[in-house]
Amino acid sequence: MSDAHGWAAPSGEPAGTPPPPAQPPAGPPLQPPGALGTPGAPGTPGGAQAAGWGAPPGWTDVGLPLKPGIVPLRPLSALEVYDGAFQAVRTAPGAMLGAAAVVVTVLYAIQTAFEVLSAQSLAPLAVDPESVESVAELSGALTTTTVSTLVTAVTELLATTLLAGVATVAVSTAVLGRRIPFGELWQRVRPRLPALLGAAVLTVLLVVAVALVCLLPGILLLVPAFTGADDGLLATGVVLLVLGGLAALAAALFAGTRLALTTPAVVLEGQPVLGGMRRSWALTRRGFWRVLGVLVLANVVMMITTTLIVAPFSVLGLVLAGAVADPSSTASALAALVPPAVGAVLASTVLYPLTAAITALLYIDQRMRLEGLDVELARAATSA
């Protein structure tokens, strides 16, 4: 299991097919009463275990599952998934937190620079709307804001994809109780980056497309209603838009959950873009609600934690910006935007790797449940 080949999907069976039950090892026939070893008696030597009655592979001699690393090698509970993610970060802080700190710092530096440009372009309009002298000036400000939003979305997608790949490899080795140097980790992640980015972009486009399809009927009715063509369509359009929004949320959760394990499949199994997406879809065919629940709870907790961490920095930014004499100046924009960015860096440095580790452990858990991966992991751990 030291390389991607050890994580390859089982061949000859459809993904998600449970493995056949393990057969106990063959041994000699049962001995009659009294023949089993007792201290000082003939038969099996005292204190030894009769042949054929040992614990099965992957289990200890007291009947507990083998745990060479951050989680036991058996189907995991939700709490064990969360605990394993924390243990993974503690086991490989350099690979996970160090990489996250560098990537996230670059991410928020780029985002903050574009946000400052956007704030400067919109500052005259915010201070005095009548100061905008032409449509071209307003259009330029809106264009800058749009570009800033797109850059923020793209850079965040790149950062989260890269960190997800790094965390996946780190977790796959931590499960076996091993630590991987960052150089070796990067050598394993780097060849998979094009497929990782392709899968991430395709997943986002798919989720957005599904959401737009759900929202389209309401939007088509609201456009003529707002232009005055038919006021009677307004109420119907609003109702359809609300229903479409709920349908879009449900569809996004469904598609996002079914495709959530794409990154581990691409990194660990060497799957191509579409192959990784199909693999994730197959692995989440069973246990969908469990995977959804674990991911939703994790993301809710992460969002709340991020808000609590960033809030004091945002207040500090407002105080500093208020102390600047000219609210439309670059200094005012920097004072308002830099402190929240620092708070976001601190929060994301820890939370991005944790989220990626949870996803990687869900992938391993699904394969242990459906494909008997725990047997292969136990064999790899005991043969190391």
Image (cartoon, rainbow, N blue to C red):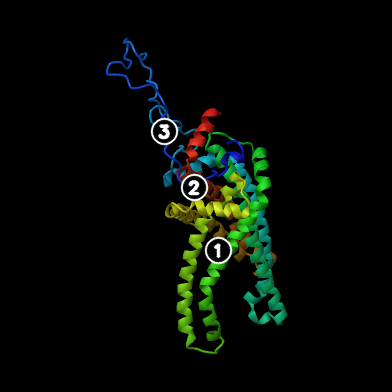
Amino acid on which the number 3 mark rests in the picture: Gln
Is residue 152 shown above or below 72?
A: below
Image quadrant in which you'd find residue 89? top right
Viewer-side residue, 325 vs 209: 209
Amino acid on which the number 2 mark rests in the picture: Leu
Amino acid on which the number 1 mark rests in the picture: Val
Is residue 71 shown above or below 350?
A: above
Instruction: Tell me the number on the disc at residue 23.
Output: 3
Q: Residue at x 49, y 76 (%)?
A: 241
Eye-nearest disc, 3 or 2: 3
Q: Earlier in the sequence, mark 3 or mark 2?
A: 3
Question: Residue 312 appears at what percent x and percent y?
Answer: 53, 57
User: Real-space Cα distance between discs 2 and 1?
Assistant: 21 Å
Q: Residue at x 55, y 51 (%)?
A: 279
Farthest residue, direction left: 33
Which residue corresponds to mark 2?
A: 362
User: Real-space Cα distance between discs 1 and 3?
Assistant: 44 Å
Q: Earlier in the sequence, mark 1 or mark 3?
A: 3
Question: Residue 54 appears at what percent x and percent y?
Answer: 40, 25
On the rendered structure, is 227 left or right of 289? right
Viewer-side residue, 237 vs 10: 10
